[in-house]
Amino acid sequence: MNTFKTKIVKTIALLAATFIFVSCSEKTEDDGVITPNTSIGIPKDRDAKPNPPIEQETTHVPNIQYTIEKEKGYIIMRIDMTGIQDPETLEWIKLLGTGDKGQNVWVSVDDKPKGIEVYNNSDDDANKTITADLVFLVDNSGSMSEEADAIARDIVAWAGTLASSNLDIRFGCVGYDGAITGAMNLTTLEYISSYLNHSSGTSRTVGFDGSDALQLKNASPSYTTRGDSWAECGMAALRFADENFTFRNGSNRIYVNFTDEPNQPNGKNGFSVEYLNDQTNWDASQGTIHTVYSDYDTTFTVRYLYDEKPWLMSRYTGGTELYASSSFTGVSLNDLPVTGAMQNAYIIRFTNIDEFMDGKEHAVKITVLSEDKNVQAEKIFYIIFGEKTTQEKPDSGHDSDKNNSKNILGSWLFTQAIWLEEGQTSTESGYNWQLTFNADGTFTEIDGTDTYKGTYTIQDLTVDELVLNYEDGSSDSYKIEKMEKKELVFYDDNSYDGKKPGDKLYWRDTYYFKKK
């Protein structure tokens, strides 16, 4: 079609809240309960017990990431979350699921118990990798000058420790005072270290860097709290990262907020800590916030919308807290509770979700209760599992040209492309590529300075595909990887002949969009 599109064969992968599929591939018994293939290791729902009641919460269930997976013909719900600590012993507990001796975690959907398989990162299974996207929110106002160098030094050392563990981790950073004064999108340890060491003191997190630096800089004025007061606001930095950074599909989203000030939204409700206390604003998949407060004085007078407790950002999302002196001495980020939370993360999987695929919210309740009752926690997440497609297979003769799936409707803006070929990766961003999908099955595409129109369909294959049929008779096919309310990801992969006879080489191109 044009120079950018000839480099790509597009495929869009749906995730979690918007996954589309045909449920007939799931095998059922006479009683309607799915009998999982033993090879996928998920217990039956009939063996699951109801979530036990808890007496009083002693800790918090962290926010989660949730995705829908297909495995050996089964549709599986996967929940990723960071670790849970015993508040008395400070040990990270090992979660045990359905059928395990000493079961200590239970999951229900709309109060229906689910048979769950649990994988703990501490199990160190080379076939399972837990991913994390970690963003540092750093107050770089004048009052932080005493601890700025120490924080940057410790962040770099700490990031190195995490990168060398069995986590698949990326790092990002936002600097703020009364405005967003600097940022770097999610990247490698090498690049985040370079960013934090490009200057000294509070200037370390001033300035925008990375391939999308200009885009981040242009977006930053919308997140200012400056006015009659300076108004340092970690919530503004959090919202900036959430709405502008490129997070990976299914990756645990983790934030660490470094500040010595109250959260100061300067009268703006959207930048208040209370914004996080409502799942309609900040849902389960948007991440957990951890707090490092470098001022032992926590007794300031709280004023809603003007001087708020920043550590409530952690308590509302299931994060942890660390308190330090203004000189940031005697503290190591390796001791930060979030370190253990990431290194002791979990994957919980269950199946038999067909009845919940109706495009409506369902209550997923996670209960954690240790045998000694030291650890008691419970949280309800409201999740849209997605909708079952009414389409048949493409070769069935069913007319699927008018697919009115609500999952894809609206306009999407390209943010980044990642090219992988022969083990080498490269990225591209800043290109003007927009896709708008209408309920009547038509679409409009802006690619550079050119505009194209046509119709689209979503086909149920081994990996669901979106097919764009252009008015000129050409078409593009996209494998669907992720489609959430804010993010769309599609990819294409294939093999090709190498220079030597018999050689087969591999490439994969992945494209990221955000909702306009």
Image (spheres, rainbow, N blue to C red):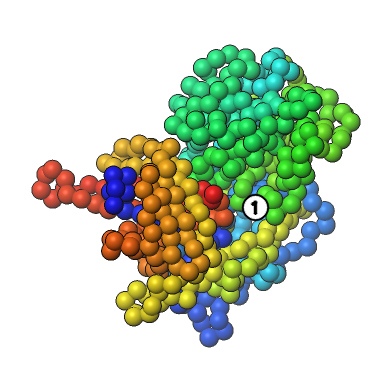
**Picture quarter containing residue 354?**
bottom right
**Picture quarter containing residue 138?**
top right
**Picture quarter containing residue 473?**
bottom left
- 149, above or below 502, in the image: above
Mark 1 lies on a secondary structure that is helix
Residue that badge 1 annotates: 284
Q: Residue at x 83, y 25 (%)?
A: 297
Q: Nearer the viewer, residue 507 or 331?
A: 507
Image-based side of 159 in relation to 72, left or right: right
- Where is residue 247 shown, x and y percent of the image? 52, 43
Q: Nearer the viewer, residue 15 or 434?
A: 434
Image-based side of 510 in relation to 258, left or right: left
- 223, above or below 345, in the image: above
Image-based side of 477 in relation to 160, left or right: left
Q: Nearer the viewer, residue 444 or 289?
A: 444
- Where is residue 31 shown, x and y percent of the image? 57, 84
Q: Residue at x 54, y 65 (%)?
A: 406
Q: For residue 131, say whether it is visible.
A: no
Q: Residue at x 58, y 13 (%)?
A: 200
- 144, above or below 298, in the image: above
